[in-house]
Structures are given as C-alpha cells and as structure tokens.
Amino acid sequence: MIDPIPPVARAAWTVERELLDWRLSRNGPTGFRASAPPNLSASKPPWARPLSEPALCAAPVSHLRLPPYQPLPPPDPAHDLIEVRVADLQPTQMCVGLAEVRSRQRDFADETPEERRAYLASKPVPLVQGGDGQVWMIDRHHRLRGLVEMDPNATAFGYLVLDLATASRDQVLEELERRGWLYLYDGRGVGPHPATALPSRLPHLLDDPYRSLVWKLKREKRIAAQPLIPFHEFRWGAWLRSRPLPPFSSERLEPALAPARALVASTAASHLAGWTGGKRDI
C-alpha cells in the first residue's frame, strides 16, 4: 500500500491553496474550487475509484510562459535499455492529469505481466543520473504514476540522456531547468515555483485538469504527439488556460470538450507543435 501524503506535503498544499485564494480575491477569476490531495491510503485501489474532490477550472489563473527547451534525445538502438525501480525515480514536474493516470491503470489491469513488460520496454523513460546515483525521469510520469500506485515494487525501462558528475540535488535541478527539462507550475497553473519544491516521489504529484483535457484531445487525435518535446501536453494546457472554458475537472471533462476541440483546431493555435487544424488522420 502506498503511504499517504506526508503532513509536510499536505501543509505545503494548504499554504498554496490559501495563497491562490488570496490571488483570486484580488485578481479574479471566480468559479474555481481547489481539490484536496488524493487519499492514497484509501482501502479501495486508486485506479478503481473516481477522482475525489475534483478541481473545477474556469478562466485562467495566470498566463503560463514555459521556458525554451532542448529537445529530448531519442533512445539509441545501439545501447541496451536500463531497468529501473519506478518508486526510486525523481519526478521533474509538479502535477499530472489524473484522467490519464486512471486510464493507464485500467490498461495495466487488463495486461498480463509479460504484456506489461513488453509495453514498458516499448515506451522507455528518458533518464538523468546525478553523481549520487539519484535518477530523474524527464517523461512518462502519467504511465509510471499509475503503475507505482498499483505495484509499489514495479520496474520500468529507460535510457540515459544525461549523466551528471555532481551529487548536489540543487545543481542537478539547476542543469535540468537550464535545459527546459522541468515543469514548475502546479495543478492550478500557478508558478513557476522554485525547482526545490518539486515532489520527490510520483504519488505526491497533484492533479492538473488542463493536463487531463489535453490528454483527451490527444487521444481523439486533435493534437498530434511530439514525444521529443519536453512537457508538450503542458504547453498546450498553458495555451488553453489563456482561453475561456466552462468549469470542468479531471473527473468531468465533458463541459469543456466541445469548446476545447474548436480552440485547438483554430488557427490561433497553429503556432503550437502538434497542431492538426482539425485533421484527425495525422
């Protein structure tokens, strides 16, 4: 069983929510209800229960301006993949879209161990290693968040994109941030936060309903995948946050789907990588 969110993380979330409420009271908008952290210690498996206390999203809290980035190197076929314990990986983002996490878990639940292992090997994780042996994941947070909730001892496959000599966590984070390999906005689009505020474990990532919305649009092939662009889906989420949408949550995406479909197909979004212009055969 996964440990519940520690008191320190819960306290930090409470302070963040109070700060957000203060910002909203000064700057608007309204119609926004923050969610509580997921109760990971509940007896019912997380992938079998609905998202509790969903965050309702309306107008944008702020305009996210993600930094420039270096593209992620693809896996090198000449090198073997590295098998890693998922629970040991350090996240490089503050949140996930829980709609995608739960969907991944349903898929995992239908697979045999052999099928799951083959699937994970086909989706290797780009990894960064520090001099102290700590390993950071630059992608695949949703897939592996879902997996580690189901099996705390699960392993996955990855490939090394950067090997740093320094054992300093701060220096590793500084290098990742310089490359644009950190996503430092929280589940309500507030940030950037200091890199030191990143959760140290996957189960502690918060929910971002806009990331769930983009996942749904990608699944409908309204946004094309760009696997070598770090945090590609969050870039689309940042753009959607600057557009008016009706209130929605990761558990209830339907109210926002129709207007979001029109927005991502519009020429206003044509500057974003993965824009299809409404063509769903890409």
Image (cartoon, rainbow, N blue to C red):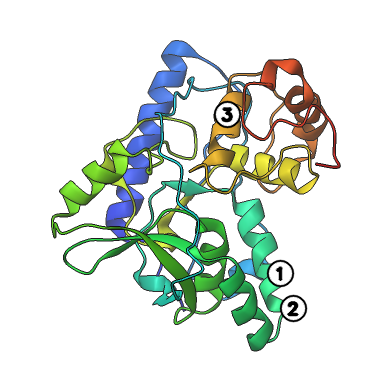
**Residue under pointer 3:** 32
Residue placed most toward the observer, 231 or 47: 231
Label 2 and label 1: CA atoms lie apart by 7 Å
The answer, for residue 55, to whether it is visible in the render is no
Residue at 54% from the left image edge and 33% from the top image edge: 235
Task: Answer whether labels 2 and 1 touch (C-beta < 8 Å).
Answer: yes
Mark positioned earlier in the residue sequence (2 or 3):
3
Residue placed most toward the observer, 159 or 213: 159
- On residue 209, which mark appears? none
Q: Secondary structure at mark 1?
A: helix
Q: Please give left or right for residue 256 compared with residue 29 in the image.
A: right
Q: Residues within 10 Å of mark 3 (few under 14, many from 20)?
A: some
**Residue under pointer 1:** 106
Please identify the quarter of the rendering in which residue 163 is found.
Answer: bottom left
Task: Residue lying at the far front in this picture: please name it.
Answer: 78
Q: Residues within 10 Å of mark 1 (few under 14, many from 20)?
A: some
Q: Secondary structure at mark 3?
A: loop
Of the 4 image quadrants, the one containing the C terminus is top right
Q: Is residue 14 depicted above or below 111 in this figure?
A: above
Q: Nearer the viewer, mark 2 or mark 3?
A: 2
The answer, for residue 241, to whether it is visible in the render is yes
Q: Is residue 236 depicted above or below 139 in this figure?
A: above
Task: Residue lying at the far top in this picture: please name it.
Answer: 27
Residue at 71% from the left image edge and 80% from the top image edge: 111
Label 3 and label 1: CA atoms lie apart by 29 Å
